[in-house]
Amino acid sequence: MGWWRAALAGLLLVGAAAPAARADGGAALGLRLGYAVPLGEAVAGDPLRRTFSGAVPLQVEGGWRAGPVYGGLYLQYGFGLLARPFTSSFQSARGADLRLGAEGRVRLGALGGTMPWVGAGAGWEWAFFSVRGLESGTLSLSGPEGSLGAGADLPLPGAHGAIGPFLTLQMGQYTRVRAEGAGSTTDLALGSRSVHLWLQLGVRGSFEM
């Protein structure tokens, strides 16, 4: 669970910088679009890439900025790209990855017309799989997650907004599984847990009120 402590420590460090922030600030909204690559294991001995070949995550976020420091909430929905070995056993299969949590960011100052930033977050993740075939049903895995990220904001001319690239490493561990099918539902704790990661690269737009 060292990754979880590291993510929380990063979030606390972002919060600790708040007293040093300038007085200016206000409500802030953001939207991210990216591509995520799966790493690590969904459960012990089962690499996540056997199920997901990738994902296209869309994230909305909102919070408050005080000077260079931002804190708020995020909601992310990832359109899952399922691996061929997984989908070949079914007539149809769909997957998704959902995240909800809190995050903080600190702008590091102007650099070449951009404003670099670093951030950290912590929340909860749900991965969903829906299949149809000889055996049809829905499987969901869920558990805590943490993230570390960095990016750069390029201010938009004549607007209270910015756009720029970001890179995020999301670290999670599935702790519960829920299976639905054939008129029954099973919900239980996972015994063979492992750590998985999503490496995400994309573009983030923001608007400040």
Image (cartoon, grey):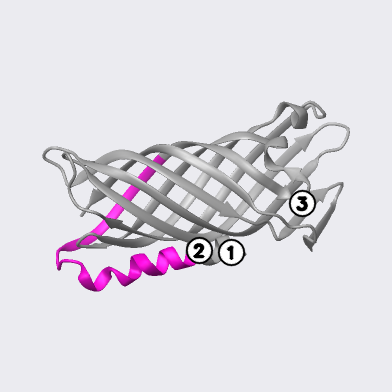
Q: How far apart are marks 3 and 1 (CA)?
A: 17 Å
Query: Going by the image, does 109 lie left or right of 169?
Result: left
Where does residue 133 sit, x and y in percent of width and height? 83, 31
> What residue is shown at x 52% (from left), y 50% (from top)?
170
In the rendered image, residue 11 lying in the magenta stretch gets the answer: yes
Q: Nearer the viewer, mark 3 or mark 1?
A: 1
Q: Which mark is residue 2?
A: 1
> What residue is shown at x 68% (from left), y 37% (from top)?
49
According to the image, label 3 marks what residue?
A: 44
Query: Going by the image, does 169 lie left or right of 187?
Result: left
In the rendered image, residue 134 lying in the magenta stretch gets the answer: no
**Secondary-structure class at tag 1:** helix
According to the image, label 2 marks what residue?
A: 6
Where does residue 141 sit, x and y in percent of width and height? 70, 53
Name the foreground residue: 80 vs 106. Answer: 106
Q: Looking at the picture, does residue 5 appear above or below residue 177?
A: below
Q: Looking at the picture, does residue 176 appear above or below residue 87?
A: below
Q: Residues within 10 Å of mark 2 (few under 14, many from 20)?
A: some
Name the foreground residue: 59 vs 35. Answer: 35
Q: Which amino acid does label 2 sit on?
A: Ala
Q: What residue type is labelled 3?
A: Ala
Task: Please provide the residue range marked out in magenta.
Answer: 8-32
Q: How crowded is mark 3: few (under 14 residues within 10 Å), some or many (20 or more)?
A: few
